[in-house]
Image (cartoon, rainbow, N blue to C red):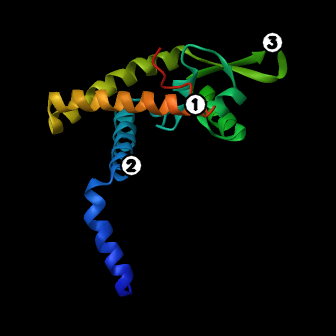
């Protein structure tokens, strides 16, 4: 049972809830992940999950080792090793010995990974159509522009503090 003070705080929070930006971002992120996973399974991509995008988007055109991937993705080396092994098992990445360090492995995108990139781009277009149905063309374009500015601003801010996120960067 809530006391009067807690009840008042909860009521104040509930009034602010609809304008809470973090809540909006969380709901959109959760919706996209759930929608994407369902869409991917329907389209036959049963062996990839939204969390795999973190790794695949970092690998892209370059080859990197597990430690660098973990650093960029902000996960432990162990977690990254598990994700790399999973993606290698399903054919999305290739793993080869590092010629400069016998303990390390080099990770690169595979042909299947490139196919998924192409497919993922088509999913983005499908998701944008959903947004257009809700917001219309003009607001969706404005949203894309604002998210682009926000993303670049976040990446720039992180560079200022030495915490570099190298994925998502448009060069």
Q: Is residue 161 left or right of residue 125?
A: right
Label 3 and label 2: CA atoms lie apart by 42 Å
Seen at 37% across and 28% down, the residue is: 149
Residue 160: mark in rendering = 1
Q: Nearer the viewer, residue 133 or 14?
A: 14
Label 2 and label 1: CA atoms lie apart by 26 Å
**Element type where label 3 sits in the image:** loop
Label 1: few (<14), some or many (≥20) within 10 Å?
Answer: few
Of pointers 3 and 2, the one earlier in the residue sequence? 2
Q: Is residue 168 visible?
A: yes
Figure quadrant of the N terminus: bottom left
Q: Residue 124 is drawn in which quadrant? A: top left
What residue does disc 3 label?
Answer: 99
For the residues carrying marks 3 and 2, which lies nearer the camera in this image? 2
Mark 3 in CB contact with mark 2 (< 8 angstroms): no
What residue does disc 2 label?
Answer: 26
Q: Residue 159 is drawn in which quadrant? A: top right
Residue 127 pos. (x, y %):
28, 32
Label 2: few (<14), some or many (≥20) within 10 Å?
Answer: few
Q: Nearer the viewer, residue 112 or 102?
A: 102
Q: Is residue 122 left or right of residue 49?
A: left
For the residues carrying marks 1 and 3, which lies nearer the camera in this image? 1
**Element type where label 1 sits in the image:** helix
Residue 114 pos. (x, y %):
48, 16
């Amino acid at each position: 049972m809530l006391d009067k003070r807690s009840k008042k705080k909860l009521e104040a929070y509930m009034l602010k809830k609809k304008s809470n930006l973090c809540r909006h971002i969380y709901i959109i992120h959760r919706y996209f992940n759930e929608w994407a996973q369902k869409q991917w399974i329907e389209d036959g991509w049963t062996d990839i999950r939204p969390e795999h995008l973190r790794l695949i988007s970092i690998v892209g055109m370059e080859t990197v080792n597990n430690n660098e991937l973990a650093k960029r993705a902000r996960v432990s080396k162990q977690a990254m090793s598990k994700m790399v092994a999973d993606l290698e098992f399903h054919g999305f990445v290739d793993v080869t010995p590092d010629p400069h360090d016998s303990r390390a492995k080099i990770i690169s995108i595979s042909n299947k990974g490139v196919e998924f990139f192409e497919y993922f781009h088509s999913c983005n277009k499908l998701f944008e159509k959903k947004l257009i149905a809700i917001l219309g063309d003009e607001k969706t374009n404005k949203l894309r522009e604002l998210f682009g500015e926000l993303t670049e601003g976040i990446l720039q801010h992180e560079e200022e503090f030495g915490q570099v996120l190298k994925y998502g960067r448009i060069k």
